[in-house]
Amino acid sequence: MNAPFALPRTVVRLADPAEPALRAFLADHPAATPFHGADWLAAVEEGTGARALALVAEAGGQVAGYLPLSEIHSPLFGRVLASTGFAVGGGLLLAEGADPAPLLAAAAELAQRRSCPAIELRGGAMPPAGEGWRIKADAHCGFVAPLAASDEAQLLAIPRKQRAEVRKGLERDLAITVGRSARDRAAHHAVYATSVRNLGTPVFPRALFEAVLDRLGESADILTVWSGDQPVASVLSLYHRGAVMPYWGGGVQAARALRANDRMYFELMVHARRRGCTRFDFGRSKTNSGPFHFKRNWGFAPEPLTYAAWTAPGAEARDADPTSAKHRALIAAWQKLPLAVANRLGPLIARGLG
């Protein structure tokens, strides 16, 4: 009589995100994002101090699942294991047919062992609701659309009203630069820091931008719009599997009248197509927010994003959303800070946002 077939036992362990087996797993996985990779985790650790961790599930000697994590500490927002830190994606990845339960249980055990009462999964395979997990499917939306085959076709693909704004920007005497040099980095930080201060949120540490550019190499760059010798709009973008993602961008006060932000995103579409991209990933926005409607005006259709959050038994749910009602008064006060003060204090706070 034949012995019954035994399924291989799943083993979960802490891993080095740079292990060759994990790199191969990510290269083959259709849902892998730039935020899953070892380079992103290392850049976040270098730029913010959030320790890079990774859980890997193995069955029969093969990778069955992978959960990248950033351990984030904040005196204001508490401690959390985020998958992945300072990212809009990077959640749990599973091989076909793999069970998420062992990895989720290991993540909860790791969080408690490291005194983190919260876990956040940003996309990827979702856990079942309950057992400390809450699923959020209506808070944020993503926006992705194909790039057109030519500059003129790209312009015509933009809805009429928004296309008129882009044309106004194209008529202005503005210069465009793309690169990763010290000048590009300084211009981007100056514009971005001003932009987020005006929105009432603290700027991320400059070291984070530097580390992302250094670690990702040719998979990241900065496009800046200049009025004379002044940078007025700038965006740090990521490139992954044929998609460009404008990730950290903004404009100074003069950008609105110059239509510099409109010019910036159109020029990025053109630049990305010329370097071989076929899709424009406009990133995530809070549902029904100003940026949400701005992206719809460009002709992008919103796609709801699903996130999950785990809270340890007896702990209060983490709220690090800088736009939440809980933080509204702080936002109003931050908008009034002198830029030099905001730039000094901002990174100390923002490194705990994750």
Image (tube, helix red, strand yellow):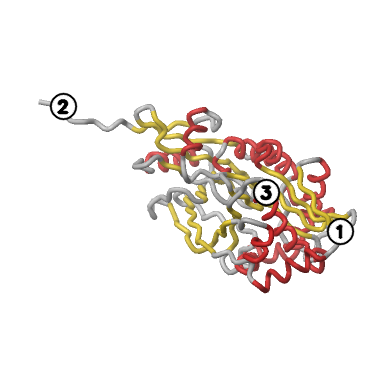
* Any part of residue 70 in sight: yes
Which element is circle 3 on? helix
Q: Label 2 amino acid?
A: Ala
Q: Nearer the viewer, residue 304 or 41?
A: 304
The answer to whether the residue labelled 2 contacts the one labelled 1, judged by CB atoms less than 8 Å apart, is no
- The percent position of residue 89, horizontal first and vertical second, equals 55, 49
Q: Label 1 amino acid?
A: Ser
The answer to whether the residue labelled 1 contacts the one labelled 3, judged by CB atoms less than 8 Å apart, is no
Q: Residues within 10 Å of mark 1 (few under 14, many from 20)?
A: some
Residue drawn at the location 68% of the way across and 74% of the way down: 161
Residue drawn at the location 61% of the way across and 52% of the way down: 77
- The percent position of residue 266, horizontal first and vertical second, equals 70, 59
The answer to whether the residue labelled 2 contacts the one labelled 3, judged by CB atoms less than 8 Å apart, is no
Mark 3 or mark 1, which is nearer the start of the sequence? 1
Q: Which mark is residue 3?
A: 2
Q: Give the residue at mark 1.
A: 227
Q: Label 1 vs label 3: CA separation?
A: 24 Å
Mark 3 or mark 2, which is nearer the start of the sequence? 2
Q: Give the residue at mark 3.
A: 274
- The percent position of residue 6, horizontal first and vertical second, equals 24, 31
Q: Label 2 vs label 3: CA separation?
A: 59 Å
Q: Label 3 amino acid?
A: Arg
- The percent position of residue 29, horizontal first and vertical second, equals 46, 41
Q: For the N terminus, give its image quadrant.
A: top left
Residue drawn at the location 27% of the way across and 33% of the way down: 7
